[in-house]
Amino acid sequence: QVQLVQSGAEVKKPGASVKVSCKASGYTFTSYDINWVRQATGQGLEWMGWMNPNSGNTGYAQKFQGRVTMTRNTSISTAYMELSSLRSEDTAVYYCARGGSYSGYWGQGTLVTVSS
Amino acid sequence: DIQMTQSPSSLSASVGDRVTITCQASQDISNYLNWYQQKPGKAPKLLIYDASNLETGVPSRFSGSGSGTDFTFTISSLQPEDIATYYCQQYDNPMVTFGPGTKVDIK
């Protein structure tokens, strides 16, 4: 069965970077885009960007341009999302989702807490 | 960027009621509109894709319609397990935008 398993919770200081992983199984990793979506506590879903695991091509929401980097390691079917220059407003649950035009499979979410 | 609006932002209905949520895009998105259900502490779950297609395994009381800029999501008979927040999401290859969500609870 299709599964996306994300790395564990992180606590970071303001100004630091965080790298969240998303390990895919149950399908051909390079056949579907990966989207990253975040959700602050009590807030809505916010799309951050996408990555094509086959080509490595990426596209980022304007809000995150310059601060986010999405990469992958195809040998271990894992996607990564790195967010830099963290601030308190980046405290949120970060999700990966198998993408394309719609996301039928999501990771379990990774809580990133930014606190001094 | 394409903006999405949803209404209402919240609603309260009785078990068995018909519930309707609307979603509007700031420009024509054809039928590239999806609906998700999210329960507290859980990842979103895809219910409807491409405006009107029911995802496999999703109960038939859920439905969607619309094209262009105006879309509707309907629960034909609200059940207690439908308490959740519902989000529309547009896909403008490859950019994605979510609506602000509609919180549904039981009266």
Image (cartoon, rainbow, N blue to C red):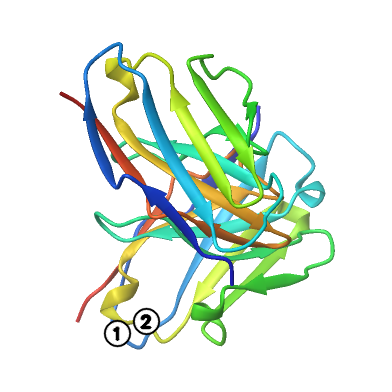
Query: Between A11 and A50, which is closer to the camera in this rendering?
Result: A50
Sequence-earlier tag: 2 or 1: 1
Q: Is residue A11 above or below residue B19?
A: below
Q: Quadrant of residue B82?
A: top left
Please give the label number shown on residue A14. Answer: 1
Q: Which residue is mark 2?
A: A86
* Circles 2 and 1 on the same subunit: yes
Q: Position of residue A102 (x, y in %)?
A: 65, 44
Q: Is residue A3 above or below residue A116?
A: above
- Amino acid type assigned to the residue bearing label 1 in the image: Pro
Residue pictured at 48% horizontal, 47% vertical: B23
State if disc 1 and disc 2 touch (CB < 8 Å).
yes
Q: Position of residue A78 (x, y in %)?
A: 66, 55
Secondary structure of residue under mark 2? loop
Chain containing the residue with disc 1: A
Chain containing the residue with disc 2: A
Residue pictured at 46% horizontal, 83% vertical: A84
Query: Between A93 and B62, which is closer to the camera in this rendering?
Result: B62
Mark 2 and mark 1: Cα distance apart in space: 5 Å
Residue pictured at 34% horizontal, 43% vertical: B102
Q: Position of residue A88 (x, y in %)?
A: 26, 77
- Amino acid type assigned to the residue bearing label 2 in the image: Leu
Q: Is residue A104 visible?
A: no
Q: Is residue A38 above or below residue A31?
A: below
Residue pictured at 81% horizontal, 47% vertical: A31
Other residues around mark 2 within 10 Å, as few (<14) / some (14–19) / many (≥20) = many
Q: Is residue A80 above or below residue A110?
A: below
